[in-house]
Image (tube, grey):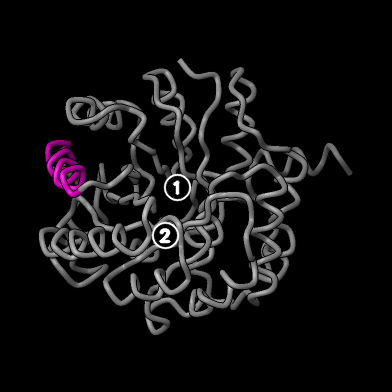
Amino acid sequence: MSDSIRIIEVSPRDGLQNEKTAVPTPLKAEFIRALAKAGANEIEATSFVHPKWVPQLADAGELLSEIGDLLVRISTLVPNEKGLERAIENKVQAIALFTAASEDFVKNNINMSIDESLEVFARVISAYREAIPGGFVRAYVSTIVQCPIAGKIAPEKVASVCEKLLNLGVDELSLGDTIGVAVPNEIIKVASLLELLTEKSKIVWHFHDTRGTAIANVSAMLDRGYRAFDSSAAGLGGCPYAPGAGGNLATEDLVYFAERNGLTTGFDPVALAEASLPVLAVLGKDPFAKAQLATLAACR
């Protein structure tokens, strides 16, 4: 079993997308560079979503030009074929697609059914593979335990969507507890079904800490042999379609927990704790991630 974990840093996209205060493009680029310097090897930088829907990410192309060729994997969310065109224009080497295990959530979020979203994904994946040989494709599956609209989601429904995505040829799946309600027992039920479909190395867990259970879920998945997790510096972000459901798992908390358990992450905790401070200042927020606060206090 590996003694290291993969951390996919999602704060520049997932962390900022729902913020009303515009973060200037140069500051976003500085943030991404600081995260890479702190040890992030994989960073989801932005999304090629229509600016009308997510104004914060309207500068996607400009941002990618500004950050240049960092020696880390930079990915972007691609919501549809139009977004793919822009990703290909920018020679993006990794893309992420988005669907959910809840029909209501997908319809509310991207205005199509799950099956319709998968039809779009099939075309997007094919076109992307042709345009960017060796390009990496991940697929987000949200609402794996509960939907803010439809309520609880059966693990079998999650497995069904994941199986279809794997058949489309995605490189990995990111499984999201979108509104942060899950406890380990619920995540284990989902994991046990996914393990019948694919190897654990193709699964990434994306936990929200709305009710303080994210690290408990991480611990359960580590015990089960999983080694890849999404997280967001400073705990920035949440779900824009689930009122009150803020709070991604903070990268600082994940790094502390993993390192304390003898796993290597490649992160410098001090540099990580400081990386988000300029962005938090623009947003008018104080640091609130527990490990970040503790680290900052210890080094001042």
Give the residue number, with chain letter if any, for mark 2. 244
Q: Residue at x 76, y 39 (%)?
A: 295
- The residue indicated by pointer 1 is 210
Residue 53 pos. (x, y %):
37, 79
Hey, which residue is sitting farthest bottom in the picture? 52
Report whether 182 appears left or right of 161: right
In the displayed structure, 266 sits above or below 54; it is above
Label 1 vs 2, first from the N-terminus: 1
Determine crowd level at label 2: few under 14, some 14-19, many 20+ residues with C-alpha closer than 10 A: few
Q: Quadrant of the C terminus?
A: top right
- 109 left or right of 67 in image: left
CB atoms at circles 1 and 2 under 8 Å apart? yes
Magenta region includes residue 208: no
When asked about the image quadrant of residue 130, the answer is bottom left
Up-down: is 262 above or below 75?
above
Q: Nearer the viewer, residue 31 or 124?
A: 124
Q: Main secondary structure of the magenta part?
A: helix
Question: Residue 69, image x and y in percent?
Answer: 62, 60
Relative side of 224 to 36, left or right: left
Q: Position of residue 212 (x, y in %)?
A: 48, 39
Give the farthest residue toward the right.
300
In the image, is 104 to the left or to the right of 133?
left
Q: Amino acid at mark 1?
A: Thr
Kindly identify the amino acid type of the residue bearing the numbered disc 2.
Answer: Gly
- Asked if residue 158 lies in the magenta stretch, the reply is yes
Please give the range of residues in magenta.
Answer: 155-168
